[in-house]
């Protein structure tokens, strides 16, 4: 059966500069085996499947699959899915705000006048201190000893992110990761010099590869850094430079929620044969 399909670029600053996402629109009726097989076949970090909501407050429901697992929440799939739903003719129940239903609950997504989207960072299900063995494994992943870290913490909001702050953005860019022997799902952040238009550089290592631009990681980092008074209420972060990308994430703390924003652009549109 033919299903509407799009592939979008999320958090980009130009053509093909963000993180790609595959979206199957109107995925109802597809068995789990088909969803898993297609997510594996796309060979992207995530593939999403849009479904009718089960919560009356939601506009749509999404399932977020990687090649090997399913996430209750992920950031760039949230923005990409909302963009695909709107572009397919979806009309939010509340003008200007799309309510996404996912495994983590309801996630609001705002539509700005310039066409960018922003999601409210969901609560972390695990935060705080990291055990010594996991820190040791993360040091292997990054190739940076713990003695040179500024801080670390759990930042789980779907994917099991371990957050590490290092000396500066140049240190982040200089990392040569070990993606085999260390802890999977390490996010690392380092600040740019004062006065830079970008506040900090981010890199995320998960699933045996480096992710170009990671919404869930950036959401957890923003919450962690705000709690520590390390960042202002409004700023921008960069990710993807070491992969030839130019991802940009805007962060806005309105006093209640922290909003993670960015551009989304449809690159491929058509149908997928998922009979």
Image: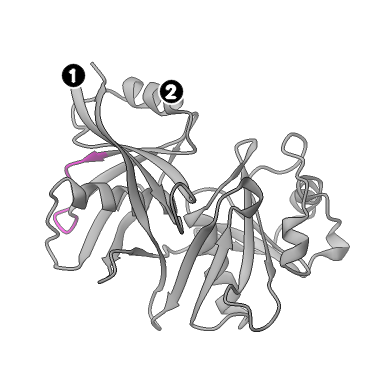
In the figure, residue 272 lies in which quadrant?
Answer: top left
Residue 83: x percent and y percent? 27, 52
Q: Quadrant of the N terminus?
A: top left
Q: Judge whether residue 230 is colored magenta.
A: no
Query: What secondary structure is marked by label 2?
Result: helix
> Measured along the vertical axis of the image, is residue 182 above or below residue 200?
above
Name the one closer to the observer, 185 or 77.
77
> Measured along the vertical axis of the image, is residue 34 above or below residue 206?
above
Residue 228: x percent and y percent? 62, 79
Give the residue pinned by disc 1: 1
Residue 271 seen by the camera: yes
Q: Which residues are magenta?
A: 50-58
Residue 6: x percent and y percent? 29, 37
Q: Quadrant of the C terminus?
A: top left
Give the residue pinned by disc 2: 41
Instruction: Report the side of 231 relative to 270 (left or right).
Output: right
> Measured along the vertical axis of the image, is residue 77 above or below residue 163?
above
Crowding around mark 2 (Cα neighbors within 10 Å: few <14, some 14 to 19, many 20+) is: few
């Amino acid at each position: 059966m033919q299903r509407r399909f799009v592939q979008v670029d999320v958090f980009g600053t130009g053509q093909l500069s963000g993180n790609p996402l595959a979206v199957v629109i109107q995925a109802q009726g597809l068995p789990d085996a088909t969803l898993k097989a297609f997510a594996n076949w796309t060979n992207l970090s995530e593939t999403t499947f849009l479904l009718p909501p089960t919560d009356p407050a939601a506009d749509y429901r999404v399932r977020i699959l990687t090649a090997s697992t399913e996430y209750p929440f992920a950031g760039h799939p949230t923005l990409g899915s909302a963009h695909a739903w709107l572009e397919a003719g979806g009309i939010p129940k509340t003008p200007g705000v799309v309510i996404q239903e996912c495994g983590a609950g309801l996630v609001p997504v705002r539509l700005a006048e310039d066409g960018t989207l922003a999601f409210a960072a969901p609560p972390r299900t695990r935060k705080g201190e990291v055990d010594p063995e996991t820190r040791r494994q993360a040091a292997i992943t990054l190739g940076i000893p713990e003695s040179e870290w500024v801080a670390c913490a759990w930042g789980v909001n779907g994917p099991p992110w371990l957050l590490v702050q290092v000396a500066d953005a140049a240190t982040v860019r200089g990392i040569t990761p070990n993606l085999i022997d260390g802890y999977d799902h390490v996010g690392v952040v380092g600040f740019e010099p004062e006065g830079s238009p970008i506040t900090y550089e981010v890199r995320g290592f998960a699933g045996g590869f480096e992710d170009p631009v990671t919404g869930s990681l950036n959401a957890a980092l923003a919450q962690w850094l705000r709690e520590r008074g390390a960042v202002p209420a409004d700023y921008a972060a960069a990710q993807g430079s070491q992969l030839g990308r130019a991802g940009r994430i805007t962060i806005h703390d309105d006093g209640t929620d922290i909003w993670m924003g960015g551009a989304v652009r449809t690159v491929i549109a058509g149908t997928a044969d998922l009979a």
